[in-house]
Each structure stands twice: as C-alpha cells, then as structure tokens.
Image (spheres, rainbow, N blue to C red):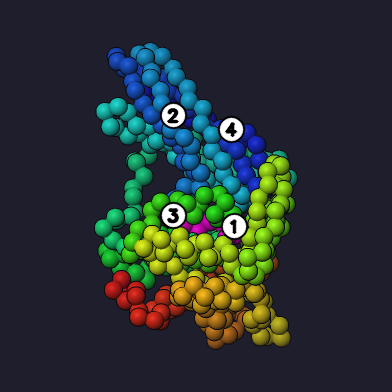
Amino acid sequence: MKLNVQIQLMGCSQVAALLGVRVELENFGATLVDVSMKAEAYEIGYYGGQPDSPVAATEIAKLKIPTGKISTAELRLRVGTPFFFTEAVPQTYAAVTTLKYADGRLDTYETRFSLLAPEAGGKILIRRETTKIPPRACRVNPKLPSLFVVSDSTAFSNGQNQLGWGDPLVKFFDTGKINVLNRARPGRSTRSFRGECLWHRVLAELKAGDFVLIQFGHNDADKLAEGRCRGVLPGVGEQTQEVVMPGGTHEIVHTYGWYLRQFIAETKAKGATPILLSLTVKNHWENGRLQLNQSEYGNWAAQVAQVAGVDFIDLTQIIAGRYDELGQGKVQPLFCSASDNVHTSPAGAELNAACVFDGLEKLPGRPFEPFF
C-alpha cells in the first residue's frame, strides 16, 4: 500500500482556518483493500509539547481499493481561531491521519505544517514531509482519576521562549495515581473554548472522580463579533447580547459568569469536581511595585465559585506574592520577552505551576493529598 497525504489551505480568517486533507492510496496487493480513515489536528508547542486532545477532527471516510488501483479521500479540518505566528516563529500543527483496515490493523501518518495569518498571505507552510509513526499512545489510564487543565495560553503557550503552567504541573503529581491532562489552548476564552467544541472533547473523557481546573479571562475581554470573535459580556449576571458573526450567522453571547456556571454544572453532572482559578499575573510594575488591580475576571470567578459552592484558588495572589519576594529585576526573565507581559518563559511556567500546586495542596479537605 502506497500513501500520499497533501494538505491545502481552503480558507483562512481570524476566526478559523479550513484545511483540505487529500489522502491518496494505491493498492499493490493481490486482494481488495477495505480501509477507513480520519484525520486530526494537534497543536505543537515550540518545545515539542502538545495537549492530548485534537483541536480539529474529520469525519471517517471509507474506501474500497481494488488491486492495482488508486483511490482518493478528501477530508476537511476546521481549525478554530488559529494562534497565528510569523514565518520566523510559526505555530506548528500536526495532522495525524489514521488508517484502519478490515483486519484491525492501524497505520498512522503525521504531517507537520504551520499557518500564517491572513495579513501575511494566509498560506500554509509544510515543515516536514508525511512520515509513518506509531499509533498515538494514550497517556490516560482509565483506571485512574484524571486532573484536567482547561485554560488559555497561560497554561499552554506555543512560541519561542514560551511555556504555560499546564505542562510542568504534572511534575508535582504521582502519575501512577492520577492522570494530569493539559487541555488548555492558546487564545481561547470561556466562550470560544466551548464554541469550538474543545470543552465537549473534555466532557467526552470526563468521568466520576475526576477534577477540572478552570481558568479563563485573559481573552474574554476581546471583541464580540470581530477578529477572533471570542469576547464575552462582563460580569456574572444573566445578560445576553445577540451578535452577527462574520459569516452571517447569529450567536447569543453571555456573561463571563454564565459561561463559568456552564462549565461547573456540566462537570458536576459527570460526577467530577470543578475548581476555579483566578488569572496568572501580568508583568506590570509601577515605581518598583507590582500592580495587582489588573483584571476583574478573578473577582468574578471568585463570586461564581462562592455561589456555586465550588473551590476557588486565588492564583493571582499566590503568584503576586512570589513576584514581590523576587522583585522586578528577577521577575522579568520569567516572561518570554520584555515586550510580552502575559506569556511566561519555561522558568516562569515552572514557578506558576508550583503556585497552582500550592493552591491545590491547601484546598479544604486536601482532596489531592493521595496523588502527590
């Protein structure tokens, strides 16, 4: 069997990129080949780390390939709000194509590519030819409870000298006792994480006894129906606003608190435990003092947690305490660059992960003590 995978950019905007995955199979064998296939896209961090859940997946295509013949499947991947970089520092994706034969055999192929923003020509950059790889290993032990990280780029960053706290958090746990699964995605808000079905993939894996760390707010103040269309209404009330999306569809946008309440309710319905976190700290100083009044989202998350009766970790205060101890000069290297006051360097990610662990360790009843 000979395989050729081609990826084409069908359309690109700040809201989504539509990719065409063309899979061409040639049967050299003596019998008819019955095969089904699908493609999934994964975000790859600059240092090679990647969340376990795909950001996009195709429908399953089925082919019957006679001897000596070539058959082609056309698959479509929709990557929501792609986290664009320049050509010098690209955001890399892995398109993983899985072939399943009638006898149960699996063949898995990976094609790595990068996307450029529409203003940079909206093109695709193939970084590596298609290579055959072992079937993706499942890091989840179904017999163990799982700790899910649901957040934005502060928990999973992709660029040069960037790392989020969701990856190094695993070092603080005994993975023989609990799965620590980073499902964070760059650029997402409470609204877009749900709208792109990223949350639904977490729900599909979630089971009784699991935990979900929920932290959003850095992107929730964005525009409602322009750019990445990820903004939410401020506050914790029940207000709504109908917006017209760039494609002409209508959407009802809710408040930040409303989206958090949906996360909480759906997590509890699965028999799992939701835990809300306030935001990571921006690198804002004035006269040598760290500025703490950086966002209202942490206060709103605390209000939602209190009313819903779920645990809340004031990560902002924990991190701020560490920063104040270090001082401005030692804090700067904890961020990826002097011009970026949000995204942490690997060292900053390690510190933030330690702060998350500190918050988890001190929760009432110490629910994580069995897993350290």
Q: Residues within 10 Å of mark 3 (few under 14, many from 20)?
A: some
Q: Position of residue 199 (x, y in %)?
A: 49, 54
Q: Identify the mark nearer the N-term, 2 or 1.
A: 2
Q: Which residue is mark 2?
A: 61
Ranked by sequence position, the earlier of labels 4 and 3 is 4
- The CA distance from mark 3 to mark 2 is 24 Å
Report x, y in % for residue 187: 60, 57
Q: Quadrant of residue 295?
A: bottom right
Q: How far apart are the two marked residues, 4 and 2, measured between alpha carbons? A: 18 Å
The amino acid type of the residue labelled 1 equals Arg
The residue sitting at 54% across, 38% down in the picture is: 77
Q: Which residues are magenta?
A: 183-191
Question: In the image, what residue type sits under mark 3?
Answer: Val
Q: Residues within 10 Å of mark 1 (few under 14, many from 20)?
A: many
Q: Quadrant of the C terminus?
A: bottom left
First in residue order: circle 3 vs circle 1: 1
Give the residue number, with chain letter if any, for mark 3: 202
Q: Identify the mark nearer the N-term, 1 or 4.
A: 4
Task: Determine the CA span between mark 1 and mark 4.
Answer: 28 Å
Identify the residue position indicated by label 4 in the image: 8
